[in-house]
Amino acid sequence: MQQTSLTIILTIIGSMILLTLFTAAVVFVIRNIRRNRRIGMMDEMEGHDFEYYCADLLEKQGFVEVEVTRGSGDFGVDILAEKEGVTYAVQCKRYNGPVGVDAVLRTYAGKDYYGCMVGAVMTNQYFTAPAVDAAKKLHILLWDRGYVDSMLEEE
């Protein structure tokens, strides 16, 4: 009789563990599907929509006073933002290929024009080697596809 009770208890515990593992797997799959859908959406956006998308993402990362600049005549800066007392000038590039050095140079100029402490280029792609070299010398942050994906994972 005691062995039957023990068998029933172990069966119940085993079933609960399996149910918990199954639930965790379903939640994991659903989150990945949603994240991948958001990432895919990023590649389909128009430039100005991508700027607003990036602004929303920065707000979710704790940036405040996030402002999308006007479309033309923005001096290479699409977003102005602040985090922990540091002001940022961000240029957004929704491209189909690598982002070149011109984006870094425009961000450098725009950062100074707006009087910001930090300049950054944010993209759905990656950067060319000359862009990376220029960014290092000019102290411009490069937020590439991998970095933006990591921001999405933190949401």
Image (cartoon, helix red, strand yellow):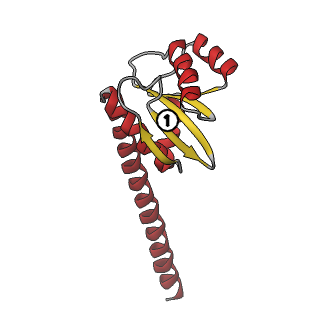
Q: Residue at x 36, y 24 (%)?
A: 72
Residue 130 rendering spot, x and y as whole percentages = 60, 10
Residue 135 percent location from the top left of the image: 63, 20
Image location (x, y in percent) of residue 35: 40, 43
- Measuring from the top left, give residue 106's x and y in whole percent: 52, 19
Tell me the quarter of the picture where residue 44 sits: top left
Disc 1 packing (10 Å; few <14; some 14–19; many ≥20): some
Image height of 11 relative to 38, above or below: below
Q: Is residue 143 left or right of residue 40?
A: right
Image position of 140 with respect to 59: above or below: above
Looking at the image, which is closer to me, 19 or 116?
116
Residue 142, can we see it? no
Residue at 34% in and 26% down: 47
What residue is shown with label 1?
148
Look at label 1 and name its amino acid: Val
Near-viewer residue (56 or 15): 56
